[in-house]
């Protein structure tokens, strides 16, 4: 499996740190509003990377944070006259709903920056101890960028080019940094802002330190993949590398993956220009499976243009797959009701099935080549065409069932639900389980039982264990 690594600007063979396991960190959204369709791109793309790796047999520890302390969140809270936590909690919940509707699996852990302050204080202290950070007079702690000799290795920037733009602020005395390249690790609080005590001043963390710390806590000092949108390469990811490698003395992440941007009608998405859509806006017109299909129809490193026509094309494409599965189901049901009774595969069908397996091989080849989902979806289309040509009233049950299984396996790797209404999403199941737990807590046992039975009807078996509720598909 090859991955394009922003660090080397090359496709490299993927070799995990620990055999059979993948440690992956994806920078999550800042939660001050409903997520927009640009934010949905990394969510869908890297969820698909995760699903493909799981299909290949890797156990993926997938961590994706929510940045829940930030200027934009504070601004919104002030406008509404509420606590910043009210705003961030609300939009985390809304984001999770959108993720579920896009069939993005919940991360193994979704850490919140505000719950990881202790780790941030520890890392900053370590950086000061090692001479990589210093406190300015007003209590701000800065990273001493020039001490980290490899600074610029991810964004392929030259330190002296970077210095130019920053000099003006230093000369004017607007900043108390030793050097224009230094960046904030900890900043003093302003009136009315959320803040935490620290050895330097009451204040809050800089954005970059959050991810270095959350990644370390849940995945360790060294991870396999760190990912996000391409706007994060500089300065966010460059700074994360500097902090983590300076503090831990180890290579932070082996592979850096970045998705290109999504534009609308060939222009940069912008609220003020009026070309801006939230995922929720799109859900009013389309099933979000179609948004997911649309996102995967391009390679993640190519810019993607969003337009009404392209969404309609995505709708047609997705429906072609769904219709093919519906046809197979129709044929299988007819068989069950005795219209046609061929259970065993004929020799000719066996040959056809071998041929059909070739599309799965093509799919894997495309995904092995830096997750080329555009070609992978093309392979699914070829399979659908093949199925539409060769499956019919005279087919055997085994043949039809195998073809259906192959379509569902490939679409499932893409996180696309090709069999409508038949399957509950993992996220829906988790949500119902949470509702059942709440009902039990409130002693509403009738509702709790109702949910258990509702899930059972859909083939989901719940098991109450000491570690909590476990579920499986039966
Ligand atoms: P933010 O909340 O701005 O930190 O963004 C969360 C994630 O969405 C980051 O990985 C960004 O790079 C990504 N992102 C933001 N806007 C776009 C866009 N228009 N296209 C693709 N990715 C985006
Ligand atoms: Zn980050």
Image: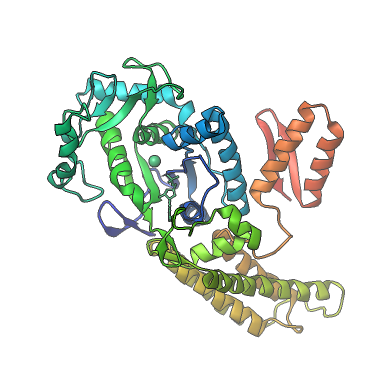
Asked whether, in this view, residue 128 is left or right of residue 190, the answer is: left
Asked whether, in this view, residue 245 is left or right of residue 466, the answer is: left
Identify which residue is drawn at 59% across, 59% down: 282
Above or below — where is 225 with respect to 178? below
Identify which residue is drawn at 61% across, 61% down: 289
Task: Determine the image quadrant of residue 202.
Answer: top left
299 or 23, which lies in front? 299
Identify which residue is drawn at 25% across, 48% down: 154
Task: Determine the image quadrant of residue 423.
Answer: bottom right
In the rendered view, how is the structure colored?
rainbow
User: Is residue 350 shown to the viewer in this render?
Assistant: no
Asked whether, in this view, residue 457 is left or right of residue 302, the answer is: right
353 or 165, which lies in front? 165
User: Is residue 29 shown to the viewer in this render?
Assistant: yes
331 or 305, which lies in front? 305
The x and y percentages for residue 29 are 47, 43
Quadrant for the N terminus, please.
bottom left
The x and y percentages for residue 264 are 46, 63
The x and y percentages for residue 14 are 36, 54
The x and y percentages for residue 228 are 40, 49
Q: How many marks?
A: 0
């Amino acid at each position: 499996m090859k991955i394009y690594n922003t660090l080397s600007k090359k496709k490299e063979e993927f070799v995990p740190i620990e055999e059979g396991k993948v440690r992956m960190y994806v920078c999550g959204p800042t939660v001050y509003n409903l997520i927009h369709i640009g934010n949905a791109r990394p969510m869908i793309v890297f969820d698909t990377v995760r699903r493909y790796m799981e299909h290949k047999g890797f156990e993926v520890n997938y961590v994706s944070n929510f940045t829940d302390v930030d200027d934009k969140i504070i601004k919104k809270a002030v406008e509404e006259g509420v606590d910043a936590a009210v705003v961030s909690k609300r939009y985390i919940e809304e984001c999770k709903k959108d993720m579920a509707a896009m069939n993005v699996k919940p991360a193994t852990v979704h850490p919140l920056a505000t719950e990881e302050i202790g780790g941030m204080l520890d890392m900053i202290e370590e950086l000061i101890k090692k001479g990589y950070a210093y406190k300015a007079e007003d209590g701000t702690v800065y990273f001493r960028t020039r001490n980290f000799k490899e600074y610029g290795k991810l964004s392929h920037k030259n330190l002296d080019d970077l210095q130019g733009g920053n000099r003006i602020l230093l000369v004017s005395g607007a900043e108390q940094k030793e050097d224009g390249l230094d960046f904030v690790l900890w900043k003093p609080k302003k009136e009315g802002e959320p803040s935490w005590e620290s050895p330097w001043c009451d204040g809050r963390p800089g954005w970059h330190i959050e991810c270095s710390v959350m990644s370390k806590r849940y995945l360790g000092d060294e991870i396999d993949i760190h990912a996000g949108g391409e706007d994060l390469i500089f300065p966010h990811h460059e700074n994360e590398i500097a902090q983590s490698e300076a503090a831990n003395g180890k290579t932070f992440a082996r592979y850096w993956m970045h998705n290109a941007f999504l534009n609308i009608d060939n222009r940069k998405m912008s609220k003020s220009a009026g070309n801006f859509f939230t995922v929720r806006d799109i859900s009013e017109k389309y099933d979000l499976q179609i948004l997911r299909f649309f996102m995967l129809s391009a390679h993640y490193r190519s810019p993607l243009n969003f337009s009404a026509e392209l969404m309609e094309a995505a709708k047609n494409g997705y429906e072609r797959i769904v219709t093919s599965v519906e046809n197979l189901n129709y044929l299988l049901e007819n068989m069950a009701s005795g219209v046609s009774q061929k259970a065993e595969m004929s020799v000719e069908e066996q040959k056809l099935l071998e041929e059909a397996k070739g599309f799965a091989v093509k799919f894997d080849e495309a995904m092995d080549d830096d997750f080329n989902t555009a070609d992978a979806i093309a392979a699914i289309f070829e399979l659908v065409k093949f199925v539409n040509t060769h499956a019919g009233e005279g087919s055997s049950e085994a043949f039809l069932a195998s073809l259906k299984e192959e379509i569902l396996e490939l679409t499932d790797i893409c996180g696309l639900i090709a069999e409508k209404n038949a399957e509950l999403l993992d996220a829906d199941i988790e949500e119902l389980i949470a509702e059942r737990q709440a009902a039990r807590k409130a002693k509403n046992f009738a509702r709790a039982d109702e949910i258990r039975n509702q899930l059972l009807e859909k083939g989901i078996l719940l098991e109450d264990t000491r570690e909590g509720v476990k579920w499986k598909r039966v």
